[in-house]
Image (tube, rainbow, N blue to C red):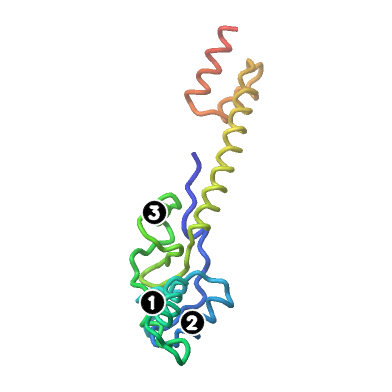
Amino acid sequence: MSKLPTAREYMAKCTFAIHPEEDIFGAIDIMVYRGLPAIPVVDEQDRLVGILTDKDCLRIVSYMVYEGYPDGLHTGAVADYMSPVKATLEPHMDIFLVAGIFLKTQFVTLPVLEEGKIVGVISRRDILRGILSWQRRERIAEVHDREAFEQTQKRPTSIEQMQKVLGAHKREQAAEVFRQSRKS
């Protein structure tokens, strides 16, 4: 099995975040314009204090309908609508561990922190993409290993061929090749 891919390999680098005191409709504009399901919310020291999701933004419409704001949509600061951070990730975490964390939360996007600072965000779709890519690489490696093994099952007739057998296999596999060649 090959090295497992990490969150760093599949996260989107976080090039911006919003502050809790920013206007909620300005934040919604950013989310819609950039096609984001969520935006990290950071304080003045760039520490993560929350996350604003598209679901959080839908609460504004809900308030308008059910609380009765006849003058139009209710406005406010991002802090009035953002969600608390329930889980964070680190860049070195493998994607299977990250998938498990996603299963414990309702968020579709999670922040990735390094030394307490946000360095990226990763979505469920990013994790699925990573798992598929890893699985394809594993299948290709498995086929390659099987083909190499079958090629070296033939009795080696020279030192060069013996070196190839030893180089292409783990110790136990190489021993089996030589045991089989003695029987032939």
Residue 67 x/y as whole percent:
37, 83
* Disc number for residue 103: 3
Q: Is residue 145 above or below residue 14?
A: above
Tag 2: amino acid: Ala
Q: In this view, does 159 lie to the left or right of 61?
A: right
Q: Residues within 10 Å of mark 1 (few under 14, many from 20)?
A: many
* Disc number for residue 27: 2
Q: Are marks 1 and 2 in contact (CB under 8 Å)?
A: no
Indicate the quadrant where residue 183 lies: top right
Q: Name the residue under label 1.
A: 82
What residue do we see at 56% from left, 9% from top? 182
Mark 3 and mark 2 lie on one chain; the one further toward the N terminus is: 2
The CA distance from mark 3 to mark 2 is: 27 Å
Residue closest to the eye, 162 or 46: 46
Tag 1: amino acid: Met
Q: In this view, does 178 lie above or below 100?
A: above
Q: Do the residues labelled 1 and 3 touch (CB within 8 Å)?
A: no
